[in-house]
Image (spheres, helix red, strand yellow):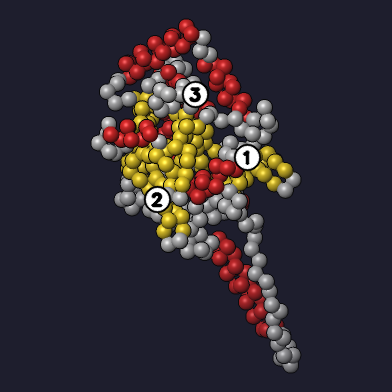
Amino acid sequence: MLKGLAITPPILGRIAIGKVIEKDGKRLPQKDDQFTLTSQIQTRDGWLAHPLDESLREAQSGKLRRIPIRLLFNEPELNLRAEYSLFDRSTARPLCVGDGEQCRRRTREGMQTLPCPSPDGCELSQGGRCKPYARLNVIVGDDDPLGTFIFRTTGFNSIRTLAARLQYFKAVSGNKLSCLPLELRLRGKSTRQSHGTPIYYVDITLRDGMDLEATLANAQQMAMDRHEVGFDQQTLDQAARMGFANGDFEEQEEDAAAIVEEFYPQGQETTPNESHPADPGMPRNGVDPVRLTQKLAAKSRRIRSAQLDRDNAPPETPTQPNEPHADTEAGSRY
């Protein structure tokens, strides 16, 4: 196995609740109120729809807000991986991922393990560069028992809800999470921060028309059937765990450019949305508020210093013109 290359579940397509549009010469994420299943092929007009998208949409009168799914693994953290992630916007390379305690960071000295203070306390994350980022792999359809669709999000509501659901369903099923027939569902809510604009997030629920007892009975029967034919779920989970640990970062550079464009946009002006949240710390109209504040503070210090020099100078000594100062900006530009 090649070291440094994360071995992730095979991807058949994407699940999204938004898309990237071009507006005023910029490519910006735009929210949506429904799911879209796409293939892995992207053209100038966007991602091509997956054949399953049309069939699922027809069954729901055109609005795709429920997707029948199964999970590939019994362990919740293998199905859903969530980390604080920072990407270099200029190269689309992942630079740092952490869990709030430790992080793996790419530096000039190589890959290092460092303390992770979370985005609020990290100097490197100034300007909204680092945010929670999660990937959920689910099985949709019956064509490929090991092929998955991936849903990516930087929304707190989706991450928190999905993590809780996976833990609870694992508990009530007796560690048969991968055998449960479940459903990916889009939910909406409004908050004071969204100013009445609906925020859409993703949840995992029982399938429409099935109660908990029927769902657990279905999972129990599937687990027995798998055992009889020699299906080893425990070894599959272990293989996945080793594959994820084989690389420093899960995201590969060939996928990172599209991820940065959709989830880490610069100068985003869209309405807050769960899949594409507006970031108040991001630059607006090309101006980075953090760097602007630093430059104004430096200029103010120079003016005060020059004023003190003039006030303290002897009356007979003419005031010399101030030496020009170059504006400096603290921190590395990412």
Residue farthest top in this picture: 228
Gap between marks 2 and 3 measured at Cα: 31 Å
Q: Residue at x 48, y 38 (%)?
A: 40
Residue 171 location, x and y as percent?
44, 20
Gap between marks 1 and 3 measured at Cα: 30 Å
Image quadrant where one finds the N terminus: top right
Above/below status of 24 relative to 166: below
Residue 118 location, x and y as percent?
56, 44
Q: Which mark is residue 30?
A: 2
Q: Which mark is residue 146?
A: 3
> Callout 1, which amino acid?
Cys
Q: Residue at x 39, y 11 (%)?
A: 221
Q: Nearer the viewer, mark 2 or mark 3?
A: 3
Q: Point out the tag, 2 or 3, that comes first from the N-terminus.
A: 2
Residue 286 location, x and y as percent?
51, 63
> Callout 2, which amino acid?
Gln
Residue 149 location, x and y as percent?
45, 32
Q: Is residue 98 visible?
A: no
Tell me the quarter of the picture where residue 222 sits.
top left
